[in-house]
């Protein structure tokens, strides 16, 4: 088989690349190889267990790509000869390509299980719809579930499982709070308060010391603090790492996090590009290697690779900025860039601007929700370093606006002077708009 472009991987990065390259040249011959029968929405995985009802509701249709002539193979690329531009799949298919795009994603961190070896009721969050369907069916009748990891997947999964099972759900987190890497203490405490209100138990500054099993299943876990928890199932949501087996096998350099090294155009080698979780990232503020794996970043990298595949353009990656969002029990949370704590660790002398207002005006309007915004500025230059917000659904786009301010290196004075549209049913009042008022509050301190 011959193809102009071979894409290995079919989640956000792979699909996004195909979408962009077909906009540039609809006649491009593309072959996409993925292991999974169906592609899914990675960030939608927790909602398979509750809100989405059916796991298949999180599947992404291939119809659009197929209609545009994309050749999709459900297979696995097992070997690549980059000199001959030849890929071989597990089924024995040989694919000759001109350009190669690696979008192999990431895999869940699988820690050592410890005493007793493997257990039947320890699970991980793989991006595989068939696996996740089996997991959901297994968990339906369970009464005691422990989630190891209090990051975004962990807390969202905990909330969704509370809709699925009639029993206890516990999070074991090694850090000082859930979501501690993305939020300052006051926001993390709001997250934990919501989780506790819906019955989730949280153990912080704890890890699993030992699994105690019987007849192939874990029955109890012992924590490093000495406590023991009875369990019917354990789910690890303790992070992911780049899936770079192919890249490493063909001699592509890796960074200290195990990701394929790429330049600002996403090039890994001559006629080879890497995008998404498998590709290296450079910190937006320092340029140093960083490990940030988000679907939104993968989508951006896919566009950059597509637009630079044949001719380098003015579109390139200028560092990786973490912009994260979540929603728990109807309250939205978002964070961008540096938290106050992270900024101080990096040596910044910070100024903070905060504000609390309702997201409609007047506040007595139906559906009004309190909106809290915190902006972090460099005291010396006034440049915004990051921000956090919580409130109603509008928090999502509010945080994206803060992200735009960070990426354009706006100062507090420039943010204060921004012209914003307001409406009683959609935003705070014109004199109380959150971002501009938070910036002003930082200036008058």
Image (cartoon, grey):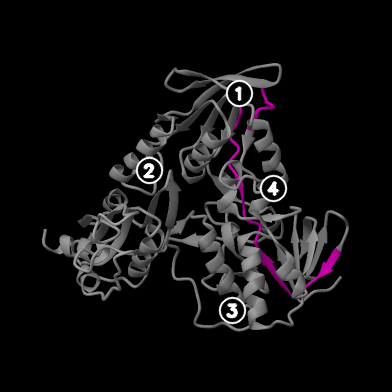
Q: Specify the quadrant that holds the C terminus.
A: bottom left
Q: Residues within 10 Å of mark 4 (few under 14, many from 20)?
A: many
Mark seen at residue 307: 3
Query: Could you tell me residue 287's position as x and y percent?
Result: 41, 64
Q: Quadrant of the N terminus?
A: bottom right
Q: Which callout, 4 or 3, points at the residue further toward the start of the chain?
A: 4
User: Going from the N terminus, do you reach mark 4 or mark 1 first?
Assistant: 4
The location of residue 208, given as percent across then percent down, is: 51, 26
Can residue 177 be seen in the rendering of this structure?
Answer: no
Q: CA distance from mark 4 to mark 3?
A: 31 Å
Residue sitting nearer the eye, 426 or 432? 426
Number of callouts in the render?
A: 4
Q: Position of residue 204 (x, y in %)?
A: 40, 31
Q: Which of marks 3 and 2 precedes in the sequence? A: 2
Q: Is residue 352 visible?
A: yes
In the rendering, which numbered label is found on residue 180? 2
- Going from N to C along the chain, the mark reached first, 3 or 1, is 1
Question: Which residue is at 46% across, 43% downward?
Answer: 151
CA separation, marks 1 and 2?
A: 27 Å
To which residue does mark 4 refer? 129
Q: Nearer the viewer, mark 2 or mark 4?
A: 4
Residue at mark 2 to residue at mark 3: CA–CA distance: 36 Å
Labelled disc at residue 232? 1
Which picture quadrant has residue 400?
bottom left
For mark 1, give the secondary structure: loop
Question: Magenta includes 111?
Answer: yes
Vertical relation: 149 (above or below) 260: above
Q: Nearer the viewer, mark 4 or mark 3?
A: 4
Q: Which residues are magenta?
A: 94-122
Tell me where residue 203 appears, x and y as whole percent.
Answer: 42, 28
CA–CA distance in space, label 4 to label 1: 22 Å
Residue 317 part of the magenta-drawn span = no
């Amino acid at each position: 088989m011959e193809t102009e472009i071979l894409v290995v991987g079919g989640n956000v990065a792979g699909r996004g690349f195909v979408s962009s390259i077909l906009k540039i040249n609809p006649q491009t011959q593309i072959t996409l190889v993925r292991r999974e029968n169906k592609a899914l929405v990675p960030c939608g995985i927790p909602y398979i267990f509750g809100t989405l009802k059916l796991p298949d509701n999180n599947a992404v249709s291939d119809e659009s790509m197929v209609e545009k002539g994309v050749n999709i193979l459900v297979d696995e690329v097992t070997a690549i000869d980059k000199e001959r531009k030849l890929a071989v799949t597990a089924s024995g298919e040989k694919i000759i390509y001109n350009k190669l795009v690696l979008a192999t994603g990431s895999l869940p961190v699988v820690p050592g299980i410890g005493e007793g070896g493997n257990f039947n009721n320890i699970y991980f969050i793989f991006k595989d719809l068939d696996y996740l369907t089996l997991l959901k069916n297994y968990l339906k009748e369970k009464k005691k579930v422990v989630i190891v990891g209090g990051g975004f997947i962990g807390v969202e999964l905990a909330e969704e499982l509370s809709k699925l099972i009639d029993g206890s759900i516990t999070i074991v987190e090694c850090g000082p709070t859930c979501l501690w890497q993305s939020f300052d203490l006051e926001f993390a405490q709001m997250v934990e308060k919501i989780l506790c209100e819906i019955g989730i138990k949280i153990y912080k500054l704890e890890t699993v010391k030992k699994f105690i099993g019987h007849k192939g299943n874990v029955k109890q876990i012992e924590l490093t603090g000495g406590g023991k928890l009875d369990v019917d199932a354990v789910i690890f949501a303790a992070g992911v790492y780049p899936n770079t087996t192919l890249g490493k096998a063909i001699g592509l350099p890796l960074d200290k996090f195990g990701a394929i090294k790429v330049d600002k155009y996403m090039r890994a080698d001559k006629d080879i590009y890497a995008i998404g979780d498998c590709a290296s990232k450079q910190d937006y503020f320092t340029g140093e290697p960083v490990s940030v794996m988000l679907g939104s970043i993968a989508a951006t990298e896919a566009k950059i690779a597509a637009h630079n595949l044949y001719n380098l353009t003015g579109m390139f990656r200028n560092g990786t900025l973490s912009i994260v969002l979540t929603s728990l029990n109807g309250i939205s949370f978002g964070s961008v860039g540096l938290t106050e704590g992270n900024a101080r660790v990096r040596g910044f002398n910070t100024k903070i601007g905060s504000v609390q207002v309702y997201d409609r005006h007047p506040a007595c309007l139906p559906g009004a929700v309190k909106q809290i915004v915190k902006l972090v500025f460099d005291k010396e230059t006034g440049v915004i370093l990051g921000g956090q917000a919580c409130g109603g659904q509008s928090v999502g786009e509010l945080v994206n606006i803060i992200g735009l301010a960070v990426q354009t290196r706006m100062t507090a004075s420039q943010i204060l002077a921004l012209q914003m549209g307001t409406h009683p049913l959609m935003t705070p009042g014109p004199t109380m708009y959150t971002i501009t008022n938070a910036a002003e509050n930082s200036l008058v301190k």
